[in-house]
Amino acid sequence: MKHIKAFNHLLNDVINLNQTRLNKLETAVPAVTNVIKDSEQFGSIYKKSSSQGSYGHRTIIKPVAGREFDADIVIFVNKHDEWEPKEYISNIYQVFKNHPTYKDKVHYNTRCISLDYADDMHIDLVPCIVDDSLAWLLDTCTYSICNRSTNKYESTDPEAYKAWIADKNRTAGGNNLIKSIRLFKYLRDIKCTFSCKSILLTTLLGNQVMDSYDLLSDEFKDVPTTFKTLINRLDHDLQKHAYMPNIENPVQSGEYFTRHWDETKFQNFKAFVSKYASWVNEAYNESDKKRSIEKWRKVFGEQFFSVNATQANKSESASLEALNERYVSIPAHYLPHPWKSCDSEVKLNVEVKYKQDFTQNFVNKLKFGSLIPKKHNLRFEIMNPVDDEFKIYWQVTNTGAEAEVNKQLRGGFELGEQVHEESTSYKGDHFVEAFVVHDNVLLARSDKMIISIS
């Protein structure tokens, strides 16, 4: 089974770089490019800047614990007649070393300088020399980056590669190639079983999209189908090579991304792609919902078909990094709602309070993600106004051995009112959701509320 919604949730809630971090990048990147543009050294030769790498290709993902996320920014400049290749990097370094905001953030790399921020973010700034001396004849420019160690120029064309991956994504349709590259990078980062640089991985996966055939094929019709297609094609491609092949930059002849690999790393990558492809096929082809979910979790971990237990608290924190995120797996017996969808579906705001059995009033507001003991009562109240002619349904889905033994897993839809009460009887993570329906059309629904009973 495909579980398209579960894939969407995995991407949106777990894999994609969250809005807080994106906002930081979108604020920081223009600020640093303006520093270069306004500097004495680069002001007269500056042409433009462009986001590249995972950030520019839109394949950037949330970093796993202890790692950083970064943005590669290429700074296009005209050639300076008096500078050697290494001086473009040393001069851009000096621009930031002499700046009060960035003087303690900047350090050298071979082909760029890096700005390290206080948390888990850094920005790489890559000077790129534009030579348009033959543009009148060839109708094109040449581009070079600088190697500080060798003091030599290296041919490149970052905008052409960016356009190449965008074209492959358009051929696949629905941004499904971009989403699948993110899934593959997430698989790499959580499994830690193979090594493959992002530029190499992106190229390998982009090469699996056949420009003419795939425009009309249905092998990229949704995210799980796209991921299955890509990993199987990649497996087939790798199996043709007894030894490590040269993976060439598709837009820059003579540049090989396998410089990041060796024979051992290639053979290991080849073996694990084949292994994971077989797991993906088993999960995709499994017709039993529960077994299929278990098989997809074998690939992507327990956060597949799960919900964020701390999601309700996100608005209470200015930064997602401040949260101690905990994901709870959605049980296989959870039922999707049976009503027609509405384009203007409203989000229901539900307030939850609790009290002990022997007390009279509900006075304590429940903080989602925290544990609540047994022998308590819960009161769920829809705070939105609901028209009398509309129907309200509550869905309660229990988990855990105690609920299962007592045949109280539930999961169905109960007709109710704006206020709904439950008792905390069984240990486990339990789901509650509210729906407003009219004429068999779903008008409004709440988030999944997770009640964790200790």
Image: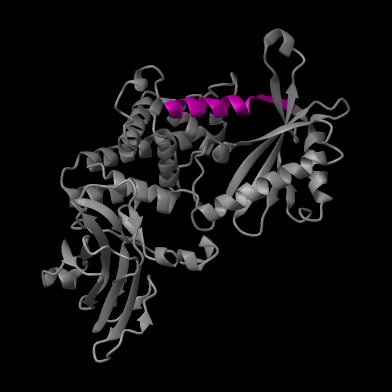
Q: Is residue 190 visible?
A: no
Residue 36 in the image: state x and y as whole percent: 78, 41
Part of the protein shown in magenta: 153-170
Q: Residue at x 35, y 85 (%)?
A: 363
The residue closer to the viewer here, 74 or 301, is: 74
The quadrant holding residue 103 is: bottom right
Q: Is residue 327 left or right of residue 324?
A: left
Residue 228 in the image: state x and y as whole percent: 31, 35
Viewport quadrant of the N terminus = top left
Q: Residue furthest front?
A: 388
Vertical order, 356 against 171 (above or below): below
Q: Residue at x 55, y 24 (%)?
A: 249
Q: Residue furthest top?
A: 137
Viewport quadrant of the C terminus = bottom left
Residue 203 lies within the magenta run? no
The residue closer to the viewer here, 246 or 262, is: 246
Q: Is residue 237 visible?
A: yes
Q: Give the main secondary structure of the magenta stretch.
A: helix
The residue closer to the viewer here, 89 or 318, is: 318
Vertical order, 297 against 311 (above or below): above
Q: Residue at x 79, y 35 (%)?
A: 88
The residue closer to the viewer here, 166 or 314, is: 314
The quadrant holding residue 420 is: bottom left
Q: Residue at x 25, y 41 (%)?
A: 2
Vertical order, 208 against 316 (above or below): above
Residue 279 in the image: state x and y as whole percent: 28, 42
Residue 452 in the image: state x and y as whole percent: 31, 72
